[in-house]
Amino acid sequence: MISAGLMNTLQITVLAGVAAGATVVVRTRTRVRQVLALSVYGVLLAILFLVFQAPDVTLSELTVGAVVLPIILLLAIAKVRKPDQ
Amino acid sequence: MTPRQRLWFFAVAAAGLVACYLWAFAGLPGFGSYPGPYGQEILRQAVAQTHATGVVSAVNFEYRGFDTVGEEFILFAAAAGMSVVLRRLREERATQPADEAESRTVPPSSGAVRVAALLLVGPTAVLGWWLASHAQASPSGGFQGGVILASAFILIYLSGEFLTFRRLSPVALLDAVEAVGAGGFVAIGLAAIAMNLPYLDNYLPLGTIPGAVSSSGTIALISFFVGIEVAAAFVLIVGELLDQTLLRRRSA
């Protein structure tokens, strides 16, 4: 078992990481880079949920937040960017 | 209103907001404290009542199964709506991406991406399938399993060609699987009513060993149907978007 003090440190570290990640996502101005930052942010959130002992939410966040949502956004950007017809 | 007045106005409003925020913050319960009795009660009784050692699944598919039906149909409606909005219109003709390879500047995916994606397809599919079909013992259930299963198909796209992805996940099959998944969930619930039990009551034998493959009655079954529904819905959504992006559509 991990001691309570170490667990608290871990939780605070991950919370700070998520706050920093969210700031990076908002501050990134290039669309494709922003999507990549969002994907990394999804992984950070998944770690947050894991540290707070919610493995089921971790798995959802990892797949939806870090994989599926960025893919949907990238496809939308690719579609808009391409000169069509 | 002059800019100076506006600034004062803002300062007063901001000070009020900060004061209220700090007041609320001081009154919060301690970090990690849980005042509700319901969660503790479920933790105490769930394994004995449902024979599912994955209590999250027991909550999702048993105690609040009716909520999960609603969530299920949110995703179902989203995928169905997407198919309708992005359907091929009568005057539209899809052209193969290869036809216009010269005019587009899509770089080919790198060898590293292809190999990594190819290696991950198998383990990802197995993990998703295991989570969806073993909800009674795994840390999560059909939803997570389904999304992970769907991402295995996305890996197939990354490792090869769009047309391979399409050949392995034909739209007609996805539509059918999605419908069977969503309908199966509802049908399991209705079967309980036919037996004069409450909707979604767990009427199947619970098995003797909690967490075993044959345990937990309808929980494992519902999770399986949720899994295939979610997997089909996500592959449908991503497939439709790939269609939109990779195949050009023109009015004939």
Image (cartoon, coloured by chain):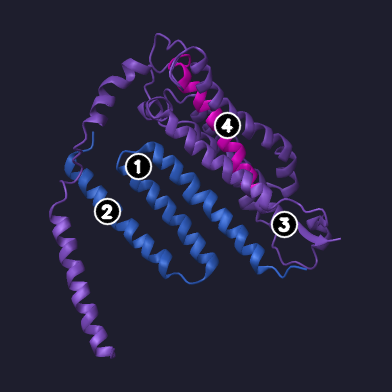
Chain colours: A blue, B purple
| Callout count | 4
Question: Is any atom of residue B170 visible in this view?
Answer: no
Element assignment for label 4 = helix
> Residue B171 versus residue B103: which sits nearer the camera?
B171
When the figure is inspected, residue A33 is found, relative to residue B93, above or below; the finding is below
Residue at (48% x, 38% y) in the render: B71
**Dot 1: chain letter:** A
Above or below for B26 versus A46 = below
* Left or right relative to B112: residue B42: left
Residue at which label 4 appears = B182
- The residue tagged 1 is A50
Q: Amino acid at mark 1?
A: Leu
Secondary structure under tag 1 reads helix
Left of B49 or right of it: where is B136?
Answer: right
Residue shown at the point (49%, 47%) measured from the top left: A64
Cα–Cα span, label 2 and label 1: 13 Å
Q: Position of residue A31 (x, y in %)?
A: 53, 68
**Helix, strand or loop status at disc 3:** helix
Pointer 2: what residue?
A: A13
Type of amino acid under label 3: Leu
Which residue was labeled with disc 3? B246
| Circle 4 residues within 10 Å: few <14, some 14–19, many ≥20 | many
Q: Relative to B52, say whether B15 is above or below.
A: below
Magenta segment: B213-239
Disc 4 marks which amino acid?
A: Ala
